[in-house]
Image (tube, rainbow, N blue to C red):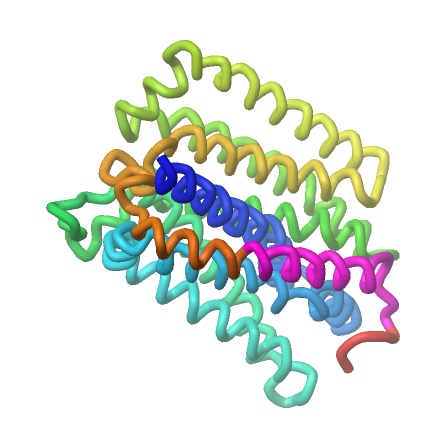
Amino acid sequence: MYGFELSFIWAGIIALSVLIYVILDGFDLGVGLLFPLTKDEGERNVMMNSVAPIWDGNETWLVLGGGGLFAVFPLAYAVVMPALYMPIILMLLGLVFRGVAFEYRWRTKRWKPMWDAAFFGGSLTASLCQGIALGALVQGIEVEGRAYGGGWWDWLTPFSILTGVAVTVGYAMLGATWLNMKLEGRIQSHMRRLAWPLAVATIAFMAVVSLWTPFQNDAYFGRWFAWPTAIFSVLVPALVALAVFGLFVGLSRQWDVTPFLSALALFVLGFIGIGISFYPYIVPSSLTIVEAAAPDESLAFTLVGTLVLLPMILGYTAYAYWVFRGKIDPDEGYH
């Protein structure tokens, strides 16, 4: 029972880390996706400056989620990584190019177009690969014994491509609502206008993925449409409708904060939906949370350090957002 409780505590910590990464790094990846949609150098500068102080801190949560999976669910890590080597490697390369572009584009004029392209290309690659990896995990990973039993290209399917595009469009919507909140003037109006079609497309993709997901696995279908868990089939869509209402009302009334918070709510609800589908598996239909967990002693030892570090990470993340709150001054930031 002791190990059972610890494994589920750790599953919650990793799920929280991944969720925080998605909603925080999602909007700054979205800023990169929107970068080519303005040619004005000053506008591009303030777009990048809106995330420059926080983007690297956002990626702390990816390290925590990935490192936590390796430390406390080594069997799941050993199965998932070989199955998703290609999208994960491409995602990391995209994040590397994007991070380098943050620094180098301010230090050159001749090569600035190349670093602008790297900023966009890295954001696009990372977004697509995160969505594809998610889709591949949702559709299931073949396990033989205690190892990955599938092929090199099993991750590439119509469903995973759909989720890749869906996540990318969703990140662009997050980026547009973030820039609407942080910027002023013509660029703010431009991003607010872009948020409309991106929001409509995101909602459409969420609907298609949600309808397709239960047919990926019989367990998903039973969990969403069998009593008592069928109540989520009513509750989650109702909350999504409320978030959609807040998003469109906020955009139509030209509010700054409400559209962004509503867009974040859509991602949180989507993540909750995936969690409902997965539970109690960490690798769907192959490995449960308990089966994949490390020994009790390892879970307890790593939990002590995590319970010290987690509040510290939450604290400095919240402090960074507090310090850099409000609108972006075009004359401040990277130059």
Q: Identify whether 275 is placed above or below 229.
A: below
Q: Position of residue 122 (x, y in %)?
A: 50, 67
Relative horizontal placement of residue 270, taking residue 86 as reference (left or right): right
Q: Position of residue 59 (x, y in %)?
A: 56, 63
Badge count? 0
Relative horizontal placement of residue 169, taking residue 321 as reference (left or right): left
Say whether residue 192 is visible: yes
Q: Identify whether 66 is placed above or below 106.
A: above
Q: Nearer the viewer, residue 177 or 60?
A: 60
Q: Identify whether 24 is placed above or below 93.
A: above
Q: Is residue 253 magenta?
A: no
Relative horizontal placement of residue 237, taking residue 108 as reference (left or right): left
Q: Position of residue 335 (x, y in %)?
A: 77, 82
Q: Which residues fall within the magenta stretch?
A: 307-330
Q: Position of residue 257 (x, y in %)?
A: 80, 43
Q: Quadrant of the N terminus?
A: top left
Q: Identify whether 227 is placed above or below 7.
A: above
Relative horizontal placement of residue 106, taking residue 326 as reference (left or right): left
Q: Main secondary structure of the magenta part?
A: helix
Q: Is residue 318 magenta?
A: yes
